[in-house]
């Protein structure tokens, strides 16, 4: 078990370069001995307290679990731990809760160390038998809390029943006082064991162990074995494998019989074996739907088979000279290698007497059927059984078993049969039972298993087969001499590397890497083994992209593996059911092309071209992608050797590449779900062929390709949501490459006819009723090359800006607006900047303001719908576009950046950096710092630049985490001290301070209050802040998003006495203006805004003068608001207000007011509520509000 250096005491690495895996090390001892002893010693104190018991148990579990992979480290300490706990068990003073807790600790130890080792340490003297038996008899099998006690007692009884005395000596006189005979010890043990065979917990397994130990005693065997076997066979026949209780009992019986035949003597059990086998045949357990019955059934059958055959070590088995890796490495091959088969083997075998009963054939048949079971645990048990039984057969029969085993690898068999066959072959080879003469048949099957992948619906099966095939290869490395495997080295090495690099399943890749490593170490004949292992180790193959795109290139650099890897990609991965694998395979072929360019051009590409127009959708998709990647790779390779793409690819292949689109079009394969794969694939081939400078200029195929792109844009709304992004990305890349290569007549000069058609078409697409068509048209305009934009810039700008303005006003087409904003920036970056340039060809002084107006307008997009704050997509795109455009302008013609533009931009970014959504706050903050600290180019006219550099030193560009509210707000609130940033920063902070997210509110409000505390004594600064706050409220009077948040923020500020200096002056203008604005807010019908308004009114009560009476009047009117929830909220807030500000009213009426506010049901009818409200008005000295009747409008006749 790997642990960190802090836990194990290993020295840490010397610096940040050190590999964390290398710093880890295994445990070297039981370091928690003292703590464990303390925990065990504390059991008498903690057993009565549930909390302490749970804590102690959990801590002990944590300690023990660290040794799951190295349990042998516990061996020196098991004895004292066992004795310490058994002292509690044996003590007559120990309550039952302590006994159960002690056995729970014993179970935890046995689970980690393994019961087979641990049970041998349990006391097994004669004096222990009766107490253990009595204690076990007292247990309640139905108690689910104490199953560990029963489990450990059964194991303990398994050891104590092995005492070397006849159990009848322990019974004494069996006659009881009443004349009725008592049960003997033997009968009691057997009865208890039988009763626990149907338990629903782990005590059933312990009962099976008990029976296997107990029944092998000579005295028990003589008296009870036949009777127990009869009972077992009766149980097997009579139980119903559809009933839960019967299933548990049958499982226990089968397990106990299997263990009995495992531990019992062959001579004693042989007479019963045929009967039990016939019983199992008649029961047809292999056809049961319960895996927990089929597995013990297979185990029992293999044990019966071993009982029929005499124990022997087959003389004909394959024997390798040295089993030790160290011995193999230290001894020369000539000295260490021995003959695989001894010369006198045949003679020796003839001398042996093989008596093969007829039942063995039945056993082997059942085991072969078990290899095809649908459960892995059953197949694994059957594989081990095949290995054990075959090891006791003569060579001819064993060879027949191997032949039958190879039938599992038929194409007619399921993946379960292939998996079971691989497991069985691994067991046979590991035991030396698979002779080298069979390798010529076995190796091709294993090679096929390493790439086994059978499609089932939308996925595939076969990962377990490939994993088991790796196990076979691993066992080959340990089983055979290098000279025996030498003819197959190339096949096995290539297949293992292909699985290591190209398998979809990470477990299979790692298993293949381990098998390859084992072969390299033990065989020493795998080509370039050490070098490959360095690059393709256990951790490196964990990442699929790295395997396909990087490791594969390194492995293919060795010529022994190049063609095999390429062929595998073409045969197995190009047509894979997973689209990700197909895409990675095509990119891998691109990367592998330089390793075998001629093979790619003459062999692989023609194969791919035939697949590209085939009938299978997945093959067609993968082949088209691969054709594109291989062609482009050949083109790039030709550039290095001064050859054109036509020199690298035959004319037939070029013609076939050109005709792919037409064939797909004729077959209507761009329609439906298949079209979602064909369209991006065809766009990829358009892109790659354009980049490869195929000689198709003025060819009709260019118009066809352009038509496909246009048709895809128009029909994007018909595509499923999961495929839209991929299609859009492929489409844009294809269009950009197509324009660059085929639409340029001369250097920097576009084909005017095509330019007019495309620009007009895509600008018209910006007005489409389909949102995705607008998105595609906008992005397509954004990726136009410079020569296509020249002379059309004004038209493009107008189209994009008009769509942004209209759609934002309507609150529709948000995604299209986002893409239009991106397109504006892309166009600006593409055309560049020239102060005195033409506004129709470049960004200049005449159109720069127009561009910035659109982007600054988009930065304030707060559109919302059922998906939430979707305007954030536009704001994010606008911020990125502002940065891109500003850096381009600043580097080319900074003089056209006016101070007003820069001020609006920086203030807008500051506002976004103060808002509540972490992602967009971080995006705005990073762009703000990027522009502030930019030196090449430097952005001119940044307001308060020196102060900003003091607030945000250059280190903050990397150290400040804008995503964390705890860090971001303490910086951003400092902008409140800068006049030009104050309004926008405060506007952004209102959304954060008035938010509902606890962390955002906590840190933003704390930073705001810290700023307010700093200006408390500065009346001028506080007055300026108050004016700014009033401006925020006034400007957003009817903006629900800002108004509610700003009222909540104002409430918090009033509660924290942020305007205490204003309260000293009667009727201060600030509170008068706030009161007037709140009266306007009160007219709304929105519950949240009204509730916030009530809270502000209560906060305004702290101001002196006439304002207080007006505030009370407003609150009293709200007590009769039409909405019951507002009346109740107002009463509650007023109650808290009276408690907080005790000078609001006359102390004589204070108790009456508070009683009335708290006891009245303010949600009752208005007539009742109005009476109580009027009483409050009288007590507070406020005129009663008069009900104004609504005048009905008299319609003119």
Image (tube, rainbow, N blue to C red):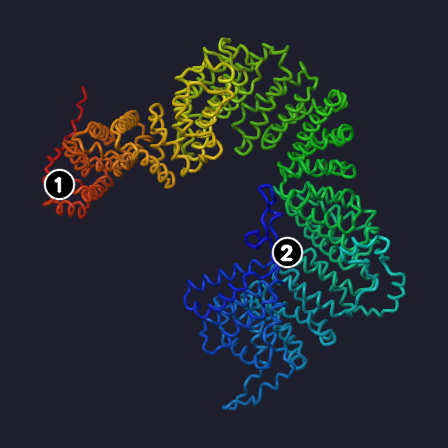
Count of marks, rendered view: 2
Q: Is residue 1197 left or right of residue 981?
A: left
Label 2: element kind: loop
Label 1: element kind: loop
Q: Quadrant of residue 681?
A: top right
Q: Is residue 1106 left or right of residue 389?
A: left
Q: Is residue 1163 visible?
A: no
Quadrant in which the C terminus is drawn:
top left
Tell me residue 111's x, y (percent).
Answer: 57, 64
Query: What is the C-alpha distance between the residues marked 1 and 2?
Result: 82 Å
Query: Which label sits in the foreground, 1 or 2?
Result: 1
Few, some or many residues within 10 Å of mark 2 (<14, 14–19, 20+): some
Tell me residue 934's x, y (percent).
Answer: 49, 24
Query: Could you say which is closer to the camera, residue 434 or residue 974?
Result: 974
Give me the residue at 61% from left, 17% from top.
Answer: 739
Q: Is residue 164 visible?
A: yes
Q: Is residue 493 left or right of residue 927?
A: right
Q: Judge whether 539 appears above or below 955 on screen.
A: below
Give me the residue at 72% from left, 48% from top.
Answer: 517
Q: Which residue is mark 1?
A: 1145
Give me the residue at 18% from left, 24% from top.
Answer: 1193
Residue 375: assigned label: 2
Query: Could you say which is closer to the camera, residue 936 or residue 380?
Result: 936
Tell me residue 916's x, y (percent).
Answer: 39, 34
First in sequence, mark 1 or 2: give its number.
2
């Amino acid at each position: 078990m790997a642990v960190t250096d802090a836990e194990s005491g290993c020295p840490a690495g010397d610096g940040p370069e050190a590999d964390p895996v290398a710093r880890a090390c295994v445990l070297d001892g039981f370091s928690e001995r003292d703590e464990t002893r303390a925990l065990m010693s504390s059991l008498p104190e903690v057993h009565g307290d549930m909390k302490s018991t749970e804590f102690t148990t959990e801590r002990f579990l944590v300690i023990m679990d660290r040794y799951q992979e190295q349990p042998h480290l516990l061996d020196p300490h098991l004895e004292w731990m066992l004795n310490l706990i058994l002292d509690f068990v044996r003590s007559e003073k120990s309550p039952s809760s302590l006994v159960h807790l002690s056995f729970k600790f014993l179970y935890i130890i046995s689970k980690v160390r393994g019961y087979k080792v641990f049970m041998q340490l349990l006391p097994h003297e004669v004096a222990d038998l009766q107490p253990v038996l009595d204690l076990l008899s007292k247990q309640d099998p139905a108690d689910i809390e104490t199953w560990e006690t029963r489990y450990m007692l059964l194991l303990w009884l398994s050891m104590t029943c092995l005492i070397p005395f006849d159990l009848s000596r322990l019974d004494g006189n069996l006659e009881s006082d009443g004349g009725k005979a008592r049960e003997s010890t033997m009968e009691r043990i057997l009865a208890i064991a039988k009763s626990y065979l149907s338990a629903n917990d782990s005590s059933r397994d312990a009962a099976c162990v008990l029976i296997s130990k107990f029944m092998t005693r000579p005295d028990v065997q003589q008296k009870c074995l036949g009777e127990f076997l009869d009972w077992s066979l009766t149980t097997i026949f009579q139980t119903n494998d559809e009933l839960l209780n019967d299933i548990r009992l049958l499982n226990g019986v089968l397990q106990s019989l299997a263990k009995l035949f495992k531990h019992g003597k062959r001579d004693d059990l042989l007479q019963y074996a045929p009967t039990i086998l016939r019983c199992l045949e008649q029961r047809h357990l292999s056809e049961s739907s319960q895996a927990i019955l089929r597995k013990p059934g297979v185990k029992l059958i293999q044990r019966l088979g071993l009982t029929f055959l005499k124990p022997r070590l087959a003389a004909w088995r394959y024997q390798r000279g040295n089993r030790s890796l160290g011995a193999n490495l230290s001894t020369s091959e000539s000295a260490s290698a021995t003959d695989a088969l001894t010369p006198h083997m045949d003679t020796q075998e003839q001398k042996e007497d093989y008596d093969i009963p007829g039942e063995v054939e039945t056993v082997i048949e059942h085991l072969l059927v078990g290899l095809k079971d649908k459960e892995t645990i059953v197949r694994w048990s059957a594989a081990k059984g095949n290995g054990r039984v075959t090891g006791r057969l003569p060579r001819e029969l064993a060879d027949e078993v191997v032949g039958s085993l190879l039938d599992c690898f038929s194409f007619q068999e399921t993946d379960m049969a292939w998996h079971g066959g691989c497991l069985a072959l691994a067991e046979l080879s590991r035991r030396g039972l698979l002779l080298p003469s069979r390798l010529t048949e076995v190796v091709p099957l294993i090679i096929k298993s390493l790439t086994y992948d059978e499609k089932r619906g939308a996925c595939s099966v076969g990962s377990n087969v490939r994993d088991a095939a790796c196990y076979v290869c691993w066992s080959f490395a340990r089983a055979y001499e290098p000279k025996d495997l030498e003819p197959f080295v190339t096949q096995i090495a290539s297949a293992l590397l292909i699985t290591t690099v190209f398998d979809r399943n990470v477990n299979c890749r790692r298993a293949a890497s381990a098998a390859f490593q084992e072969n390299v170490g033990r065989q020493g004949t795998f080509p370039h083994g050490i070098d490959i292992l360095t690059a393709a180790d256990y951790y490196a193959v964990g990442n699929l992209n790295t395997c396909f795109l990087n490791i594969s290139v390194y492995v293919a650099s060795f010529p022994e593996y190049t063609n095999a890897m390429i062929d595998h990609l073409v045969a197995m991965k190009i047509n894979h059911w997973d689209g990700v694998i197909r895409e990675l395979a095509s990119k891998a072929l691109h990367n592998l092309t330089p390793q075998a360019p001629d093979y790619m051009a003459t062999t692989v590409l023609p194969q791919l071209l035939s697949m590209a127009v085939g009938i299978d959708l997945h093959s067609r998709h993968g082949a088209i992608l691969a054709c594109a990647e291989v062609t482009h790779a050949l083109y790039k390779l030709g550039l290095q050797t001064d050859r054109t793409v036509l020199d690298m690819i035959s004319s037939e292949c070029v013609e076939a590449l050109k005709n792919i689109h037409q064939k797909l079009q004729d077959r209507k394969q761009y329609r439906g779900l298949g079209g979602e794969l064909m369209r991006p694939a065809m766009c990829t081939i358009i892109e790659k062929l354009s980049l490869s400078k195929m000689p198709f200029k003025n060819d009709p195929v260019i118009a066809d390709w352009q038509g496909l792109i246009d048709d895809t844009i128009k029909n994007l709304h018909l595509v499923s949501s999961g495929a839209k992004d991929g299609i859009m990305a492929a489409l844009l890349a294809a269009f950009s490459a197509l324009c660059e290569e085929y639409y340029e007549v001369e250097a920097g000069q576009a084909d005017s006819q095509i330019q007019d058609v495309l620009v007009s078409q895509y600008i018209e697409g910006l007005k489409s009723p389909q949102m995705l068509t607008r998105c595609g048209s906008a992005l397509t305009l954004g990726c136009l090359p410079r020569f296509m934009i020249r002379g059309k810039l004004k038209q493009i700008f107008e189209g994009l800006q008009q769509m942004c303005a209209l759609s934002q006003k309507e609150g529709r087409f948000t995604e299209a607006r986002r893409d239009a904003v991106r397109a504006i920036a892309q166009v600006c970056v593409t055309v560049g900047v020239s102060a005195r340039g033409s506004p129709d060809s470049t960004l200049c002084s005449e159109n720069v303001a127009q561009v910035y107006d659109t982007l600054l307008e988009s930065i304030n997009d707060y559109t919302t719908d059922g998906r939430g704050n979707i305007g954030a997509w536009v704001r994010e795109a606008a911020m990125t576009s502002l940065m891109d455009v500003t850096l381009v302008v600043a580097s080319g013609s900074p003089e056209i950046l006016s101070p007003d533009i820069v001020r609006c931009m920086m203030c807008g970014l500051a506002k976004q950096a103060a808002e509540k959504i972490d992602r967009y706050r971080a995006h705005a903050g990073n762009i703000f710092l990027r522009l502030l600290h930019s030196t090449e180019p430097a952005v001119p006219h940044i307001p308060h630049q020196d102060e900003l550099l003091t607030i945000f030193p250059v280190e903050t560009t990397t150290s400040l985490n804008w995503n964390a509210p705890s860090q971001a707000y303490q910086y951003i609130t400092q902008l409140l001290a800068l006049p030009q940033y104050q309004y926008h920063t405060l506007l952004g902070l209102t959304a954060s301070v008035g938010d509902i997210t606890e962390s955002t509110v906590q840190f933003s409000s704390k930073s705001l209050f810290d700023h307010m505390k700093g200006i408390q004594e500065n009346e001028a600064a506080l007055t300026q802040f108050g004016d700014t706050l009033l401006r925020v409220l006034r400007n957003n009077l009817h903006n629900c998003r800002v108004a509610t948040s700003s009222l909540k923020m104002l409430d918090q500020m009033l509660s924290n006495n942020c305007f205490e200096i204003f309260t000293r002056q009667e009727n201060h203008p600030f509170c008068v203006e706030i009161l007037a604005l709140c009266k306007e807010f009160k007219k709304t019908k929105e519950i949240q805004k009204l509730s916030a308004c009530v809270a502000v009114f209560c906060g305004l009560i702290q101001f002196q003068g006439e304002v207080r009476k007006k505030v009370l009047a407003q609150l009293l009117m709200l007590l009769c608001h039409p909405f019951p929830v507002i009346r109740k909220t107002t009463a509650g807030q007023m109650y808290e207000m009276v408690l907080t500000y005790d000078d609001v009213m006359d102390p004589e009426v204070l108790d009456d007011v508070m009683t009335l506010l708290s006891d009245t049901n303010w949600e009752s009818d208005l007539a009742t509520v109005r009476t109580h409200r009027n009483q409050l008005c009288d007590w507070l000295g406020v005129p009663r509000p008069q009900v104004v009747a609504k005048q009905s409008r008299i319609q003119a006749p």
